[in-house]
Image (cartoon, grey):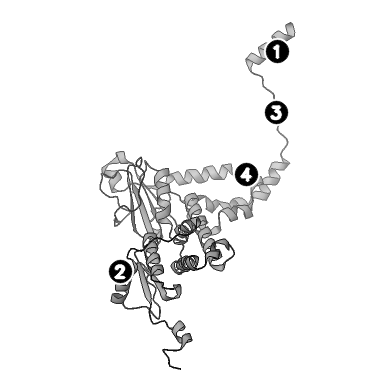
């Protein structure tokens, strides 16, 4: 049996490979166009290699750059729409934000199987669907944690010194697990519409300039390249979201005076009797503590919690005195006279 006629060899070493280059790690539009085109050409999932412009995947069978570009141009051509379950698009929107480099291959495999296996949509225990569901859940959790644990610090940048009426720049540092910055940025734009802010992360940075007529702002100590606005904004939001490259933790500002006031408040309002370390670590894992100002007090306060609780219990009960308002007291005295 010749090498070209060996069925097993042809499956292990396919003669036709389809590399697809996407414009970025969250290029959902490009993935949809490529997936529709590949399905129309009946290209099975095992013959597709997904790449992104920011982090191309190098594999044994990947074609050279010119060949990949030509194949990519054909893969991105318009193709007819394909009916999928209603929840599949929402699943794609979340899974594509995951950091797993095989997420595009997984989504296309599910897409291919939905077209060829009608019963797949009724099988919630399918391994591919379960894996995609776990990835979507991880992304949702990461989105929630970023909304909850971002802490801004005020910076008097060049724009503030030139135009104090615009207010200072508020900067924050966060380390997300997945590619969620562009997806969560509109939330912060709606929440802090009238405030100039910037969030720095290792992979991507975002800036909200509520005074878009002014010149672009700069990061603390060095200028930051500014990209064109990517995310659409509601009509009521007068500003621009700009996305740029990642940053280092040293680019973030240090603690300010307002942070010390918060630490003092947190230390004095801490209730040792209500401390539940396991529940707190479940909602606020330790990996986020290094970027939260109040987390530095958790250890000392938790160590003294038992002693402070016993001290509170040992204190005598507080005697309460009932105080009647003057009007009620006058009414009570007049009723006694009657």
Residue where numbered disc 2 is placed: 73
> Which residue is depicted at the point 57% across and 61% down?
122
Picture quarter with the C terminus = top right
Residue where numbered disc 4 is placed: 271
Q: Is residue 198 left or right of residue 285?
A: left
Residue where numbered disc 3 is placed: 320
Asked if the residues shown at circle 2 and circle 3 are in contact, with their CB atoms under 8 angstroms apart, the answer is no
Q: Residue 220, percent across and down?
A: 33, 53
Of the numbered discs 2 and 4, the one sitting upstream in the chain is 2
Q: Residue 44, percent across and down?
A: 44, 73
Q: Residue 76, percent across and down?
A: 33, 66
| Residue 246 visible in the shown view | no
Foreground residue among 334 and 13: 13
Q: Is residue 203 left or right of residue 329?
A: left
Which element is circle 2 on? helix
> Which residue is depicted at the point 51% across and 62% down?
135
């Amino acid at each position: 049996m010749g090498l070209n006629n060996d069925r097993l060899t042809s499956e292990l070493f396919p003669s036709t490979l389809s590399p697809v280059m996407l414009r970025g790690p969250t290029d959902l539009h490009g993935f949809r166009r490529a997936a529709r085109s590949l399905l129309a050409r009946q290209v099975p999932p095992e013959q597709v290699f997904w790449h992104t412009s920011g982090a191309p995947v190098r594999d044994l069978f990947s074609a050279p750059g010119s060949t990949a570009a030509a194949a990519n141009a054909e893969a991105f051509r318009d193709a007819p729409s394909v009916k999928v379950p209603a929840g599949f698009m929402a699943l794609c929107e979340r899974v594509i934000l995951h950091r797993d480099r095989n997420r595009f291959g997984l989504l296309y495999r599910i897409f291919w199987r939905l077209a060829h296996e009608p019963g797949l949509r009724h099988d919630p225990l399918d391994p591919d669907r379960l894996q995609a569901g776990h990835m979507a859940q991880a992304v949702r959790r990461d989105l929630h944690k970023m909304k909850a644990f971002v802490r801004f610090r005020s910076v008097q940048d060049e724009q503030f010194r030139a135009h104090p009426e615009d207010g200072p720049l508020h900067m924050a540092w966060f380390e997300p697990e997945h590619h969620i910055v562009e997806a969560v940025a509109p939330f912060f734009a709606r929440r802090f519409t009238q405030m100039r802010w910037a969030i720095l992360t290792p992979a991507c940075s975002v800036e909200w300039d509520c005074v878009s007529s002014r010149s672009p702002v700069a990061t603390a100590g060095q200028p930051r390249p500014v990209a064109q606005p990517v995310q659409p904004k509601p009509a009521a939001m007068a500003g621009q979201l700009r996305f740029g490259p990642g940053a280092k933790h040293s680019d973030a500002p240090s603690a300010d005076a307002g942070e010390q006031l918060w630490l003092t408040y947190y230390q004095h309002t801490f209730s040792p009797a209500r401390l539940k370390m396991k529940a707190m670590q479940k909602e606020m894992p330790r990996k986020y503590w290094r970027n939260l100002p109040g987390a530095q007090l958790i250890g000392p306060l938790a160590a003294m919690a038992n002693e402070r609780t016993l001290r509170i219990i040992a204190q005598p009960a507080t005697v309460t005195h009932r105080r009647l308002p003057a009007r009620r007291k006058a009414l009570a005295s007049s009723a006694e006279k009657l």
